[in-house]
Amino acid sequence: MTAATRIGVTGATGRMGREVIAAVADHGSCEVAFAVNREPDGETVDGVAVDPAAEFGSLLAAHEPQAVIDFTGPESAIEYARACADAEVAFVTGTTGFDDDQLAALEDAAGEIPVLHAPNFARGVQALVNVIGDAVKSLPGYDVELVETHHNAKRDAPSGTANRLLDEIEANGEFSERTHGREGEAPREAGEIGVHALRAGDITGEHEILLAGNHEEVRLTHRAEDRGVFAAGAVDAAAWIAGQKAGSYDFADVIDE
Ligand SMILES: NC(=O)C1=CN([C@@H]2O[C@H](COP(=O)(O)OP(=O)(O)OC[C@H]3O[C@@H](n4cnc5c(N)ncnc54)[C@H](OP(=O)(O)O)[C@@H]3O)[C@@H](O)[C@H]2O)C=CC1
Ligand SMILES: O=C(O)C1=N[C@H](C(=O)O)C[C@H](O)C1
């Protein structure tokens, strides 16, 4: 029997951290090596003790996980990535909202360890990423607008997934400008993609791309019904990355294998 992949979990008491701990238990061939959060108060999540993030380095040394899964914030994610690089432990992050310097810091870590960064671990979103470029290319001259909707506690806008989809749309060459919302005298211009971020209630995550022209419209929509879908994908990624060499990976690498 193959030994279970041992996984460290950051942000353990957050919305996603809790889901990750549950998904590791459901996976069948993974187990939680340890879990940390910024300032835990003696909590447990699904029976797993949550230790202070300040002990992350010593927990890596003591428990020797094969991978760490991180859903926190950009600042902490790059600190965790650096500690993983120092300890030679693979790092999987679903955190979004990185700036260019923070992305460069993740790349630095990827020079030493396997690093997988994906703004969305839902398989349906990956399918959408795969087809959106072709859809836009097939409808030249059509207007493109993207609407993403998330819960009212989300920090970054637009979402990491929206930015990933926009990159795919722009790769076609017809679109080069992102217009974030509209107000006042703001007619649509050629080459622009309207981007709209809605924040309300406890909505898990929705992304819709509208293509309109020629007296018709096409709407491509992904709706996550439960955060468990993201957590399951991240655990699949951690199980996969444990055997990889240093480098930058994304979720497509896991699915395509
Ligand atoms: N790739 C994907 O599929 C998905 C990505 N995400 C992304 O994951 C991230 C987390 O989302 P979510 O779980 O909803 O957020 P939450 O706010 O619910 O949880 C974040 C967790 O990270 C901890 N944390 C935040 N900042 C720090 C810090 N500086 N140092 C140490 N710990 C920190 C928080 O601790 P504390 O409790 O002390 O605040 C909390 O436990 C976001 O970037 C989100 O966009 C979310 C869903 C899916
Ligand atoms: O913060 C969230 O909740 C989510 N964030 C990710 C993003 O920014 O794309 C993925 C998902 O939509 C949920």
Image: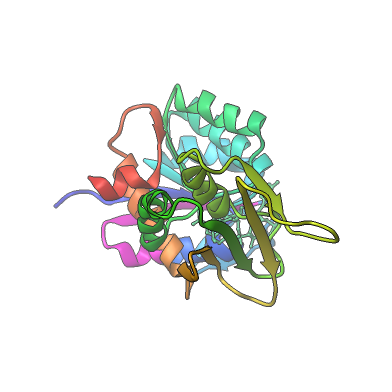
Q: Out of 251 and 210, give the one closest to the viewer.
A: 210
In the image, residue 27 lies in the stretch drawn in magenta: yes
Residue 65 seen in the figure: no
Residue 33, given in percent of the width and then of the height, sits at 42, 50
Q: Position of residue 207 (x, y in %)?
A: 53, 64
Q: Residue at x 41, y 52 (%)?
A: 129
Ligand 2, image quadrant it occupies: bottom right
Farthest residue toward the left? 1
The number of callouts visible is 0
Give the farthest residue toward the right: 184
Q: Nearer the viewer, residue 100 or 58?
A: 100
Magenta-span inclusion, residue 11: no
| Drawn side of residue 71 relative to residue 254, left or right | right
Report the side of 54 relative to 56 (left or right): right
Indicate how the structure is coloured in the image. rainbow
Q: Could one spot residue 122 in this view of the protein? A: yes
Residue at (65, 56) in percent of width and height: 195
In the rendered image, the quadrant that contains the C terminus is top left
Tell me where the magenta segment starts and ends, as one range.
23-37
For image coordinates 35% across by 57% down, the residue present is 127
Image coordinates of residue 191 in percent, x first then y, are: 60, 45
Q: Is residue 1 above or below residue 101?
A: below
Q: Nearer the viewer, residue 134 or 117?
A: 134
Rendered residue at 56%/66% (across/down): 44
Above or below: residue 170 compared with residue 218:
above
User: Is 42 placed left or right of 183 in the picture?
Assistant: left
Quarter of the rendering containing residue 102:
top right
